[in-house]
Image (spheres, grey):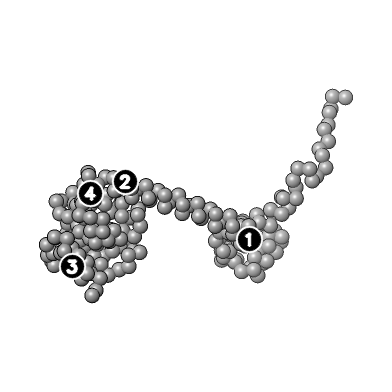
């Protein structure tokens, strides 16, 4: 049995009258944001204040917690109700279900914080392993050597970037990366102490 037919049976079993002219079947993946779902957007255009959108799964309202919350907010502002049978027959847009929506917002915040933390931990672990961070260079190794030789020859960053068909920022990053080892060597304690000059005598 196709998924949408199973969903229709669930809606009918929950006591709702199924008018096939008001049924919208989404064919895209549940990973697609609500704004990119053609059938869902058609349903939104059809809905009028006082109508109720009925679905069987929360994933029908969005591809993430943030997307679901955004959809519920949109429906509420338009005076449209929303029922998700996986949660029950309560109207998610009603005042009585504020607690549910608030729980979704808290889960969204937790998801955002943990995702950011995982990204930082992954970047730190990659740095410890010596894995290069950031975007890969737009220049090949040979082009990088060519750029270095051109810098040594006194050509400007703009001229080199134009010759290699790249951005000035790329050449400047390359130049700065080469300068870093020299800068690192010039640390306090690694060069002669300054001599104080007193002209009072």
Classify mark 1: helix, strand or loop: loop
Q: Are marks 4 and 2 in contact (CB under 8 Å)?
A: no
- Helix, strand or loop status at disc 4: loop
Could you tell me residue 47's position as x and y percent? 17, 56
Whether 194 is drawn above or below 84: the answer is above
Disc 3 marks which residue?
A: 9
Q: Residues within 10 Å of mark 2 (few under 14, many from 20)?
A: few
Badge 3 element: helix
Q: Work out whether mark 3 precedes mark 1 in sequence or the reverse, and give the earlier one.
A: 3
Is residue 150 toward the left or the right of residue 76 in the image?
Answer: right
In this view, 74 is above or below 144: above
Mark closer to the chain start, 1 or 4:
4
Q: Residues under labels 3 and 1: Cα distance?
A: 54 Å
Looking at marks 4 and 3 on the same chain, the residue that comes earlier in the sequence is marked by 3
Residue 172 visible (yes or no) = yes
Residue drawn at (88%, 24%) of the image: 201
Tag 4 residue: 93
Kindly indicate whether the residue at mark 3 contacts the one at mark 4 (C-beta within 8 angstroms): no
Residue 37, position as x, y percentages in the image? 28, 64
- The residue tagged 2 is 102
Seen from the viewer's position, the closer of residues 97 and 117 is: 97
Q: Nearer the viewer, residue 50 or 161?
A: 50
Comparing marks 2 and 3, which lies closer to the viewer?
A: 3
Residue 129 - label: 1
Dot 3 crowding, Cα within 10 Å, few <14, some 14–19, many 20+: few
111 sits left or right of 168 in the view: left
Distance from Cα at disc 1 to Cα at disc 4 = 49 Å
Res. 194 image quadrant: top right
């Amino acid at each position: 049995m196709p998924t949408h037919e199973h969903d229709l049976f669930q809606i009918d079993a929950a006591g709702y009258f199924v008018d096939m002219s008001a049924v919208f079947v989404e064919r895209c993946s549940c990973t697609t944001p609500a704004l990119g779902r053609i059938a869902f957007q058609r349903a939104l255009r059809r809905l009028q204040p006082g109508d109720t959108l009925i679905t069987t799964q929360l994933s029908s309202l969005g591809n993430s917690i943030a997307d679901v919350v955004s959809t519920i907010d949109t429906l509420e502002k338009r005076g449209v109700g929303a029922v998700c049978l996986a949660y029950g027959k309560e109207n998610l847009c009603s005042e009585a279900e504020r607690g549910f929506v608030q729980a979704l917002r808290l889960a969204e915040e937790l998801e955002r914080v943990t995702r950011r933390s995982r990204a930082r931990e992954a970047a730190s672990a990659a740095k410890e392993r010596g894995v290069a961070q950031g975007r890969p260079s737009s220049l090949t190794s040979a082009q990088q050597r060519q750029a270095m030789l051109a810098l040594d020859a006194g050509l400007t960053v703009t001229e080199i970037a134009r010759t290699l068909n790249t951005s000035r920022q790329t050449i400047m990053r390359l130049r700065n990366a080469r300068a870093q080892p020299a800068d690192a060597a010039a640390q306090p304690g690694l060069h002669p102490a300054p001599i104080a000059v007193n002209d009072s005598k």
